Structure formats: C-alpha cells, structure tokens
Amino acid sequence: MKYAIKIHKISTVDELSDAWKVEDFKALLKRFEFPNNDVSDIKELRELLFMAIADKDPSEAATIVLDYKLGAHLNEGQIDSLSYEMLVDKISEEYPKIDLHKELFNVNQLLYKAFNGTFPNTKATIIDFEITPLLNANKEITKEIVLKCFAKNLDSHNIILRLFGKQLSGDEAFEEADDIIWDLQQNETSRRLITSEYFMNNAEFLQPEMDCKIDFFTEE
C-alpha cells in the first residue's frame, strides 16, 4: 500500500506536557509525606514535589515515584533495581519492555529536574505531519502504518531499522509499533506523533516529503 508523507515540524522535548496532573502531584506528595492540603495550583504542587523529592536520597525518591507510576507492572525487586540503574543509565530507552518506555521517560524526567541533573537526561521527539493514503491504501491510519512510512525516510543508522527489519518488511507482525509510537494524535489538518528520541530523532530524517510503499504481515 502507498502513502504520501509531508513533515511540517520535528521537535525535541525533555518532558511531555500532559505527563502529570494535579491528582498525580497530590498523590506523590502524600507518598513523600509532604503536606499539600491547601494547594491546588499545578505549578505550586510541582515545586512542592521537587522540594520533597530533593529531600530524599535519589534512589529512594526513584523508588517512590516508580512504585506510584509503575507499581501495577513491576514487582518490588524490579522497582528496587531500576531505582539504582536509573542513576547511571537511560532506562527509558534501554528497558526491554517497550510498553513501559513512555512512563519510564516521564519518571526519569521528573527526577532529572527535581535533582538538577543527577539522573541522565532523556528526550522525546514530536512530529507534526500529514499522511495521505494513495490508490487503494487503508484510510484508517494506525501506528503501524505511520511507523512503516516514517521508517522509509530514516537513515540506515536508525535503531528501528536495525532492530525491526523483519517487522518493517512485513515478514513478521509488528506489534511493537503500538509501543514505539507513544501517542498518535489527529486534528482537522494534520497529525502528531510522539516517541522517544532513541527511536527517531531530527537528524535521522532524510527529506520533508515522500511517497512510500509499505507491506503488511499476513499469516499463511
């Protein structure tokens, strides 16, 4: 199937604007045993949380935030290990479970900013683009379609090309696409995808516009 891609803007960010809500900050402050009953402004809550986090040992603070964000997915031992590994490695890029990368990024960046750089700094990539189905291509645009199209426009050093060659070619199912692309948003005129800079970064794109033909896996 063929699609036309037009990239409008590629941005690199060190946090996602919707990663944390008022309720999250209040819940975390409670876990850090930091009073916040009279506060409802999200900026003030964030400042209080940074103070509470900075009062703790970095690995201890990481354990608390990880347990809050990922306690339903990781056991106590996994969280304890990650709380130390995060201090030296970019866990949100290296952790084998790709479906946890987005939340690990959010946790990492909260801790990075609260501790003024004690944790490694990681980045996310936001791409504003248009995608147009050509001929008889699917009009419903999925994360797999978008990722396969963008992969045609990335240089050969890109990590997606190296790790998921068989999935991109249609020789295997590409279930990982749903986790590699963290969010796929649409408005009246364009679309926006959010992913880790680890998977796609500005310097890897070859051209702003292109037509691409992609293939899908079919079970025999």
Image (cartoon, helix red, strand yellow):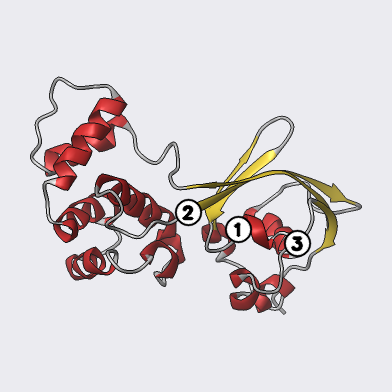
Report x, y in % for residue 3. 83, 54
Q: Amino acid at mark 3?
A: Asn
Q: Is residue 194 visible?
A: yes
Q: Kindly check if marks 1 and 2 are in contact, taking CB atoms under 8 A apart as contact.
A: yes
Task: Work out how far the residue at label 3 is from the one at label 2, CA to CA, in angstroms.
Answer: 21 Å
Task: Give the image location of residue 22, x and y in percent.
Answer: 29, 30
Q: Which residue is mark 2?
A: 123
For disc 1, the marked residue is: 201
Task: Check disc 3 and report the residue beneath it.
Answer: 153
| Residue at image point 72% right, 47% down | 140
**Nearer the camera: disc 3 or disc 2:** 2
* Left or right relative to 122: residue 158: right
Percent position (x, y) of residue 104?
36, 57
Secondary element under disc 1, as helix, strand or loop, is loop
Task: Give, as a three-letter code, the residue at label 1.
Answer: Asn
Q: Earlier in the sequence, mark 3 or mark 2?
A: 2
